[in-house]
Image: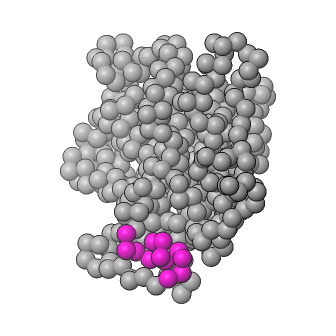
Amino acid sequence: MANKPTGKPVRTSRSGGASSGKKAVTVRSRSSMGRDPVRLGPDDSDDSDLKGLDKAVALVTNGSPVSKSSIDGSSTKPVDYSGIRCLLNPVWCYYGFIISVTGLTLFGLLMVFSSSAVDMLAKSMPTWSELLSQTAFAVLGCVIGFILSKIPVKVFRKLSKIAIILGIVGQLATMVPGIGSEAGGNIGWVDLGVVRFQPAEILKWVLIIWMPAALLASRSKRTVKRKPLLSFNSPPWMRKIGRIVERFVPRQYWAPIFGFTLAFLAVLVGRDLGTGMIVVLIGAVVLLVGGFPLRMFVVLGGIGAAGIVLAFVTGSSNRMSRIMATYGECSTEDLTGVCYQSIHGTYALASGGLTGVGLGNSREKWNYLPAAHNDFIFAVIGEELGFLGACAVILGFVIMGWCMINIAVRHQDAYARMVIMAFTVWLVGQALVNIAVVVGLLPVMGLPMPFISSGGTAMIMCLAAAGTVVSMARSQTEIKAAVSHM
């Protein structure tokens, strides 16, 4: 006669990820018999059931100290990082990321001065006014980034719920009369008199901190037999809809998707479709890395994209004219209107040639190219430093992206992996979108280039993001061992 399940936890020998040798607990209850047992570990960093990126982690970390035997405390053979394999060394990537962030920030200050000096003279202001302002923001961002780099990973997870609430409330504050401020056709600023900032930049940071934590928390809950989405008293057609919803969106993803949707809609309320696109990319990479079924992701993503195009693109004559100006022909009237900025950006790039006209010698910045020190600063870089200078900037972001991805796939903590990958999409993805806009591959959408474009909130939050990545990277096994010896 079979023994009845007691519901008592059964200890297993699997350890809790990057944390330590604490044992996970497998729970079997009466309601969950016949299903796979659920592990309730002391830390979500175990998460050996993750899909998506975690399948690649086993291959990438094969034979490295960041393997199961290393986590269990047994000895492993050191990894050979000689020759070209040094590009896979997470310690090298750790310092490479810091160097790339520092280099791009300093280079950005130089180009902000070069591209804004003429505009400052036209406003009867000292030529270095914009440089001093941007330098102050960079210093403040470095201080915030340094503080964040010293905060343990578990603290970010604990404070993420409060952060996402404050972030969404701050973004909605842009719609409050007397507080919200408009710039470039978007209502995306909060003006408090003494300070004026862009809450969407802060919202991107808090979304990245919260969404992976919410995903892991919802998936690590104890498995019990749940009631259907719609009760048995509902009509048959409603119960059928409930089963379809649960089939395409498993319940463990409801909380993160709900929060992500609120953040996205809060951004779109201010008509900032460019920032909304970056928010969508952040949410998409978190879901993919977190194991969201790819088939469901494609279906839901297609439906969501179609809805955005119908509701926010075709319904705006300004956005439609920008799209037609990018992928169609510009009329005579458009040359001085919707096509003006993109055309002069192309003029600047074409004038630069291979080596450029020289630092500070741009002609388009003489009030021909709008937002020369902001959204279109890459055009000024191409004009003054040429093709080689533009390639150097792209290389800087490529190095940054490679280092972040390499650290992420070699990290033992599922939360840190998702956070680092999401920051990669924000920092590197937004830079690539900005470059694509300047060269004419995408319509103008008002996205600045991280670390380089002028903008106080953007600079501070990009450096805050870099500090958060450093904090996550420090908990990686090899990086932690290398940093502790310094």
Name the colour scheme: one colour
Instruction: Check residue 70 for magenta coloring.
Output: yes
Seen in the image, is 171 located left or right of residue 425?
right
Decide which of 473, 388 is in the foreground and name it.
Answer: 473
Q: In the picture shown, does residue 82 fall above or below 188?
A: below
Residue for point 20% across, 50% down: 354
Seen in the image, is 244 located left or right of residue 27?
left
Residue for point 39% across, 44% down: 432
The quarter in which the C terminus is drawn is: bottom right
Tell me if I can see residue 438 in this picture: yes
Residue bounds of the magenta highlight: 62-74
Rendering coords of residue 228 (x, y %): 69, 29
Decide which of 366, 335 is in the foreground and name it.
Answer: 335
Q: In the picture shown, does residue 460 fall above or below 306?
A: below
Seen in the image, is 483 located left or right of residue 180?
left
- Point out the residue furthest to the bottom here: 485
Rendering coords of residue 361 (x, y %): 33, 49
Residue for point 77% across, 39% down: 192
The quarter in which the N terminus is drawn is: bottom right
Seen in the image, is 471 located left or right of residue 231?
left
- Point out the residue furthest to the left here: 354
Decide which of 399, 380 is in the foreground and name it.
Answer: 399
Tell me if I can see residue 127 in this picture: no
